[in-house]
């Protein structure tokens, strides 16, 4: 059983993907071809953001958003230590300082009640992560940010398609940044990502930064990067969008069925807040004796993963930024989280096997 079943998805979309790719090969506009604008239009409409700027990865999306905000060395960005390294990496790459704030124990998202105390005169932005496909608590976070005149960048790499109070992840704050890494809820066949914003000036800055800071051909108005998403990758995402609503529905159903089947099993489930629809970028639970449980599941042919075994304040590259601060909730989560096989094509029979093996491993 695969951890993420990309083969079944490909089998279902094979002809559409081939057609879309063939069209690119025929017109030959491999960079910034018509599929780029077509995808940006569809994704902006889907999220409700005024602008979508496709870029070469989710990491590049975060980096370009911070560059558009003109992050300077020494500027502080408030974020979570319980995330993939890319979140803090982009801050540090620009000379910024990640200021970590601990997470909520039941969602693993930024604990918004701890944010305001960490704002200083050097704070330049707040970067929550919508982990496992559930949006962070954006409304109170946006309110705090507005009080202090700060922009909010949602790291929506795992949450594309999720909703918060009826609005889509990515369109909930100054910027939303997502990833089309193959294993994300909406993936391409390589690296890709997108920035969402409804601010015209920031959107323009992102478009320029994406192409080496050019405001016109060979006019380099600012320092930028080579951060475009390939036309071929955009074509693949366009093909995948054709059944994306169905996939989101399946993800919600499979997530709900896992939660129902695992109720009372001894694993602790993630809480999904009532004002949110989770897309289960990962279906993650909390277990005791995780290494043993994982070994037991592996022996039964069930792959699992840990997102993430070490929070960033315990990573050599980022520990210095944490100073003496403690992040006990992140530490506790990192020892207990375990992700189960999850994708839109996971069958009920496969899911039953996962749950049965997991229950046996806990007995
Ligand atoms: C995947 C991921 C990223 C980075 O996306 P890439 O496309 O791999 O660069 C950033 N943040 C989080 C939370 C992620 O899961």
Image (tube, rainbow, N blue to C red):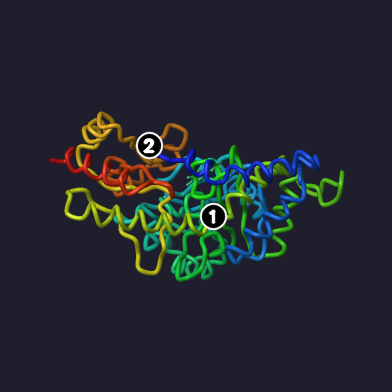
Q: Nearer the viewer, residue 288 or 103?
A: 288
Q: Secondary structure at mark 2?
A: helix
Q: Is mark 1 within 8 Å of ligand 1?
A: no
Could you say which quadrant of the image residue 228 lies in? top right
Q: Nearer the viewer, mark 1 or mark 2?
A: 1
Identity of the residue drawn at 44% across and 40% down: 5
Residue drawn at point x = 35 percent, y = 37 percent: 305
Q: Is residue 329 shown above or below 197?
A: above
Q: Position of residue 171 (x, y in %)?
A: 56, 63
Nearer to us in this view, 358 or 113: 358
Nearest to the observer: residue 253 or residue 80 = 253
> Residue at position x 28%, y 31% from top?
298
Q: Is residue 176 left or right of residue 4?
A: right
| Residue closest to the eye, 75 or 206 | 206
Mark 1: secondary structure: loop
Alpha carbon separation for disc pair 1 and 2: 40 Å
Asked whether, in this view, residue 134 is left or right of residue 203, the answer is left
Expressed as whole percent of the image width and height from the top left, the position of residue 214 reads 80, 47
Q: Position of residue 253 (x, y in %)?
A: 37, 58
* Corner quadrant of residue 249: bottom left
Where 63 falls versus 303 (above or below)? below
Q: Earlier in the sequence, mark 1 or mark 2?
A: 1
Q: Quadrant of residue 307?
A: top left
Disc assigned to residue 280 = none
Q: Residues within 10 Å of mark 1 (few under 14, many from 20)?
A: few
Q: Is residue 84 visible?
A: yes
Q: Position of residue 306 (x, y in %)?
A: 35, 38
Residue for badge 1? 243
Number of marks drawn: 2
Q: Residue furthest left?
A: 363
Which residue position is annotated with label 2?
314
């Amino acid at each position: 059983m695969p951890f993420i079943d990309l083969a079944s998805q490909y089998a279902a979309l094979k002809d559409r993907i081939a057609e879309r790719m063939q069209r690119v090969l025929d017109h030959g506009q491999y960079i910034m071809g018509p599929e780029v604008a077509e995808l940006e239009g569809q994704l902006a409409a889907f999220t409700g953001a005024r602008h979508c700027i496709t870029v070469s990865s989710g990491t590049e999306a975060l980096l370009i958003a911070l560059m558009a905000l003109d992050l300077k060395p020494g500027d502080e960005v408030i974020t979570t230590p319980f995330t993939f390294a890319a979140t803090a990496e982009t801050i540090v790459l620009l000379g910024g300082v990640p200021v970590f704030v601990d997470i909520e124990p039941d969602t693993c998202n930024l604990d918004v009640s701890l944010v305001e105390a960490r704002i200083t005169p050097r704070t330049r932005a707040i970067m929550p992560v919508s982990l496992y496909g559930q949006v962070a608590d954006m409304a109170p976070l946006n309110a705090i940010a507005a009080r202090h005149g700060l922009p909010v960048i949602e790291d929506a790499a795992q949450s594309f398609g999720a909703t918060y109070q009826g609005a889509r992840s990515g369109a909930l704050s100054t910027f939303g940044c997502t990833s089309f890494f193959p294993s994300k809820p909406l993936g391409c066949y390589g690296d890709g990502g997108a920035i969402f914003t409804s601010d015209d000036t920031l959107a323009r800055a992102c478009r320029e930064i994406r192409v080496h800071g050019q405001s016109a051909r060979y006019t380099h108005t600012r320092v930028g990067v080579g951060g475009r998403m390939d036309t071929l990758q955009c074509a693949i995402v366009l093909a995948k969008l054709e059944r994306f609503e169905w996939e989101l529905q399946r993800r919600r159903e499979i997530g709900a069925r896992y939660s129902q089947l695992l109720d009372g099993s001894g694993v602790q489930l993630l809480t999904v807040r009532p004002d949110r629809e989770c897309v289960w970028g990962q279906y993650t639970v909390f277990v005791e004796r995780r290494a043993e449980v994982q070994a037991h599941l592996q022996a039964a042919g069930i792959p699992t993963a840990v997102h993430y075994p070490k929070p960033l304040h315990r990573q050599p590259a980022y520990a210095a930024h944490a100073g003496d601060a403690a992040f006990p909730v992140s530490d506790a989560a990192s020892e207990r989280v375990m992700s189960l096989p999850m994708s839109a094509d996971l069958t009920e029979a496969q899911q039953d096997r996962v749950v049965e093996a997991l229950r046996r491993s806990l007995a």
